[in-house]
Amino acid sequence: MKILVINPNISETVSELILSEAKRTALPDTTITMVTAPFGVAYIETPSEAVVGAFAMLQLLAEHHENHDAVVVAAFGDPGVIAAKEVLDIPVVGLTESALATAFLLGGRFAIVGISQRIGAWYEQTVNQLGLSSRMIGYRGLKQGFSSVHMVQNEARDILRDMCLSCIEQDGADSIILAGAPLAGLAREIECDIPVPLIDGVGSAIRMAETLARGNFAPRRVGSLSPPPTKPHRGLVGNISQLIGKE
Amino acid sequence: MKILVINPNISETVSELILSEAKRTALPDTTITMVTAPFGVAYIETPSEAVVGAFAMLQLLAEHHENHDAVVVAAFGDPGVIAAKEVLDIPVVGLTESALATAFLLGGRFAIVGISQRIGAWYEQTVNQLGLSSRMIGYRGLKQGFSSVHMVQNEARDILRDMCLSCIEQDGADSIILAGAPLAGLAREIECDIPVPLIDGVGSAIRMAETLARGNFAPRRVGSLSPPPTKPHRGLVGNISQLIGKE
Amino acid sequence: MKILVINPNISETVSELILSEAKRTALPDTTITMVTAPFGVAYIETPSEAVVGAFAMLQLLAEHHENHDAVVVAAFGDPGVIAAKEVLDIPVVGLTESALATAFLLGGRFAIVGISQRIGAWYEQTVNQLGLSSRMIGYRGLKQGFSSVHMVQNEARDILRDMCLSCIEQDGADSIILAGAPLAGLAREIECDIPVPLIDGVGSAIRMAETLARGNFAPRRVGSLSPPPTKPHRGLVGNISQLIGKE
Amino acid sequence: MKILVINPNISETVSELILSEAKRTALPDTTITMVTAPFGVAYIETPSEAVVGAFAMLQLLAEHHENHDAVVVAAFGDPGVIAAKEVLDIPVVGLTESALATAFLLGGRFAIVGISQRIGAWYEQTVNQLGLSSRMIGYRGLKQGFSSVHMVQNEARDILRDMCLSCIEQDGADSIILAGAPLAGLAREIECDIPVPLIDGVGSAIRMAETLARGNFAPRRVGSLSPPPTKPHRGLVGNISQLIGKE
Amino acid sequence: MKILVINPNISETVSELILSEAKRTALPDTTITMVTAPFGVAYIETPSEAVVGAFAMLQLLAEHHENHDAVVVAAFGDPGVIAAKEVLDIPVVGLTESALATAFLLGGRFAIVGISQRIGAWYEQTVNQLGLSSRMIGYRGLKQGFSSVHMVQNEARDILRDMCLSCIEQDGADSIILAGAPLAGLAREIECDIPVPLIDGVGSAIRMAETLARGNFAPRRVGSLSPPPTKPHRGLVGNISQLIGKE
Amino acid sequence: MKILVINPNISETVSELILSEAKRTALPDTTITMVTAPFGVAYIETPSEAVVGAFAMLQLLAEHHENHDAVVVAAFGDPGVIAAKEVLDIPVVGLTESALATAFLLGGRFAIVGISQRIGAWYEQTVNQLGLSSRMIGYRGLKQGFSSVHMVQNEARDILRDMCLSCIEQDGADSIILAGAPLAGLAREIECDIPVPLIDGVGSAIRMAETLARGNFAPRRVGSLSPPPTKPHRGLVGNISQLIGKE
């Protein structure tokens, strides 16, 4: 199986973290293609950054999806993921929805721990849009900054672990999602200190992408997620016009 | 007062409909700047088309917002509107949220009537994301196609009027939103046949933009809609880097 | 445009605050008619007081609505507002729904700050009934009393400002509604200290009443908000029988 | 036990129906005091009629509550019931909340059948405000008129029975509430034809009033339903000033 | 009237508490049959314990229901109560749903106080499943253990009372449910210290069982709570096969 | 990997369908242990049958779970699944939650198609309890009976396929769950006729069980799904006392 993993942000160092965790997680015969956004920001924290990331992701998708069996959009908040599901016949999953599906199956209520206060509002909107707010028990995010986004899991490890413990002790979390591609792999590092399951977004997304691809589901030919209708268009960069407005 | 009206789609003919209704609606001393997306599709019906439209809108916003008092994003579904609120200190409103606020104040429950079946799912998601689903009573959309999107309100006037009547008689709507910039102005044409208020998206958005601008609300300096944080970025086209990632 | 503003409470001094803010807010060619309840309480805090206020409001409405283009019911909690919408063909708005529509369009989630602890439950019910609870982040109210209700905004200004800051820092509010006619005008006084938009109920209601009136919406002839059906009635004081049970 | 039953409408003939069903339902040692509104409409169908009915009810309550152990407000839609709970230390129940509590305990989902189309919106708002919408499966109301409201259960018996059957067969109701004081007693007449429990509002309210009174619950001294605070008031008719604004 | 009260747990000492409170609560001519589970745990705190308790309850129901007019399942969390409603034509109520119906009629929002932290999650699920979460304001449970479950109300009386006060002062509860059969009767002991109504689960259930039985509701012959369909079965112990799969 | 698959019903023929689909779905190195309830009914349609099935499942779980890496409870409605998660450290999934997680990741809204009208209410409760009702668009079930439950997918294939098409055309489903172990494998048979993804419960559950097991999540040591507390117990059959009440 071949999975295309798209980092909708420009941070190559985060792509390395993602790729490393993706390879460690994947089934033996799965191969990963990792691509990184040519333009955008270092990491998405807000709706305006997500608009840019979603567009960059769609360009990468148009360019690279061929010959793959599934796609992972490797940013929490799932920028453009519904759009990507719509334009392709192969499964596309985001980090948020994959982590949520994992928490959903583990049972009970989950908390989300992430790399900034600001990013929490966007995550909550994403969970709400996906329809799983009733299973979410809260969000906790770092208050302090970091030198570089790919370093945050090292620099703030102890604080992140303590936030996980607060989610359990004060909020009653039954599982915890470590949110955001920059935290890829952290769950394995700190899980021995945490008395409930820790969910890694990248790991969840790889496994869920494999799971959907193994399901061989028929493509959507009607309905709200079938390919967008043919219509007049102009100036669509890259191969986007092969996905949208196409005839 | 100066209002920037952005058509996030490429259809100049629809921009003319929008501009015409905007001028007819605005206060005497309001002036309208109308801009149209240089790339994208003729009209947005789906999430993938909205990704493109939101990005085009953000570019136009970066380029044209200066010296304006408010912005209207003139596509139903409000592509990128939350993003636009975040990056500017002046008020930004979308067609959906403005029509919804109008229906909300008129009272009771509203229905939405639009130009295609497909577009209904996206509208419902938008209403849900805005938190007003409990006031929405249903969506009805055209089943047949049309020669060109700016002609749909003429070609299908009778059918659109009959759909409005069905929303009232079968669903119990207390008001009806005629959704989508391509229907701008239609409400005035058919309201004599409809026994509940008909809400025009463009008219609502112009009035609500003026209303917010007159309120002179302080800009957001903290919280989930304050300007996005400074951070590394690359390749942001146009002036987007003055809105996102900026220092 | 002529707007009838009804204070459903007996406090003439609060009517002065309302009128002052209404005039400061209104469009240049809008004139305001201000009327005050001849019976009832000084300010509504609870459902039983709202029953009295709603009835007094309906009497004033019957007596004064002629020759007006819109009506504002100037008490937070919107006593009798749905009833008033139903009996008149011109737009009627309440302070709560107008402030909510404003917060809704500004985006994100709002908090409400008011003049007593007790009043919070009633406000929450009102927001819930209007269907916008998912956008409300919390209520904070004064714990201490005040010498007279029209003095509360002066006597407790610093505490009210600090409560606003707590709504932002502890609850994450993206905007704050200063609730209750007795706080009319306070937003302008303290907004320089508050890093998110402050919403004044009276100001919002005047602007929203103008907005609806400018919309020239057709009156409701069917549905749950059309005029109440003709039926036997008895002893309806004032001109209420011209609104209810009428033939 | 002494129960005060208040008809917030002017129809003495409906009061007779209510009293008859109340007596048939009550425990052997319960006595019923039946009072009828001196002003208002024949039966409440809409929010504006409910404003009048709630005020009339409050006057009757102030005048007659002494020496009673519980109060029933005998109109569906529960006009003023929350207000009445607040001002008295003895239990007060409405027809809607009592029928809902009964349906809630019988299990599954209920439908409501009532005497007009128009009245349905108000009932749905009431159920929503009480928080039980997720257990309500739908409303069906008479389309045709009737000679007099106390005659409707005779004149439309067959149609009402058929609507009950439609609620079961088409909507999947597990129980049915026959809504409105004018239908008091009808459940017993037609229950042999209906294969799920039929719930009478008056019968439910009498039994639930007795149930609460037998519970000897301590009166509320704090919280959102404790007596309204002392405050300046003016012109409160009857004994209302002993309930509201009192010192 | 004869009411069968089933303790789905093995604790005979708790059955004594239940029986004592049931007798004190019941109408003069009501007789109580008290039965205790022959197998299971001392008290149910979790879903797995509830699976066992529900099965034991169903066996006791099959064996003892004849010649009774109503059934009370005397464990908070209502294990198997929906199942029991389905298989019998007489009313069956649980402690949770009865206490909730009581709180619902008293008005406002309720808190639940119980005997352990762990049990809170199960109670919240029960309330959510019953559809009344919007009326629940929180749960507080004992942190410390106790020597034996029937002793907990004596050993922890002061702490339980203080938790009730916290529910009022910190959470704003309008009434409080003392949850769990082991707390039967405690409400009467401490209500003088608590300024809002205290609701006893056993007392509520007895009164609500009597209320439903007095209603003489027709049995369900269709719908989701009518008797389970006849079908192949095997090895059903006791008389369960007379309730399930029967011909 | 070793997966224990439990049929909580007595139908060996359905177990064969389950086992066949499980083997066809599983990863090459997964082995399946299939066990069937020694007592109970042929298939669960209602809450009372689910009480029996959940208890039988727990007995089989206690007896067979050792040396397995994950458990599948192979009945739609997930009888006892939350209980089973709680008592074991290895992942346990039900058919409903697995199919729902699959539909959730495929995107949009799902419909459920099942083998009887009656079973629909129970399925809807299950989806509601899991928190995904907002993604469910409806249920459609067979109206006619069948000779034997394992034959239903053959006997009613055309009708089931037509119901799937109705879910798409009339309800707007983006994917369809074929619900119930008796329909295991049907999706592959009819998917060529259905223009949206068809989801098989057994297939989903096997893949999701493997996915969770591959995640190596730490067992829960605190929280609402940690092992049930030690407490007095009596008469727990089989090895259930090693799961519940254990020391």
Image (cartoon, coloured by chain):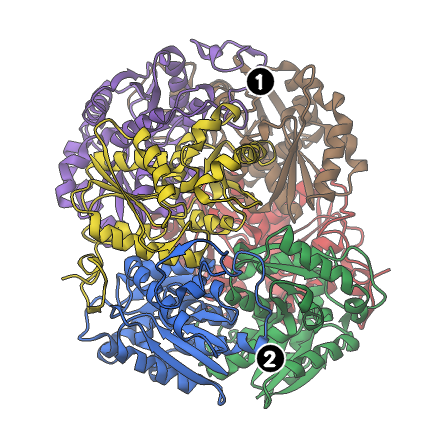
Chain colours: A blue, B yellow, C purple, D brown, E red, F green
Task: Quickly name the residue at label 1.
Answer: D35
Q: Position of residue A150 (x, y in %)?
A: 25, 78
Q: Nearer the viewer, residue F127 or D102?
A: F127
Q: Are marks 2 and 1 in contact (CB under 8 Å)?
A: no
* Left or right of E94 in this view: C219: left
Chain of the residue on which disc 1 is drawn: D
* Left or right of F118 in this view: D55: left
Chain of the residue on which disc 2 is drawn: F
Residue that appears at 31% across and 55% down: B56
Asked if one can make out residue E74 in the rendered structure from this viewpoint, the answer is no
Establish if E214 lies above or below A113: above
Establish if D217 lies above or below B60: above
Task: Quickly name the residue at label 2.
Answer: F71
Q: Residues within 10 Å of mark 1 (few under 14, many from 20)?
A: many
Residue that appears at 36% across and 51% down: B79
Of badges 2 and 1, nearer the viewer stands: 2
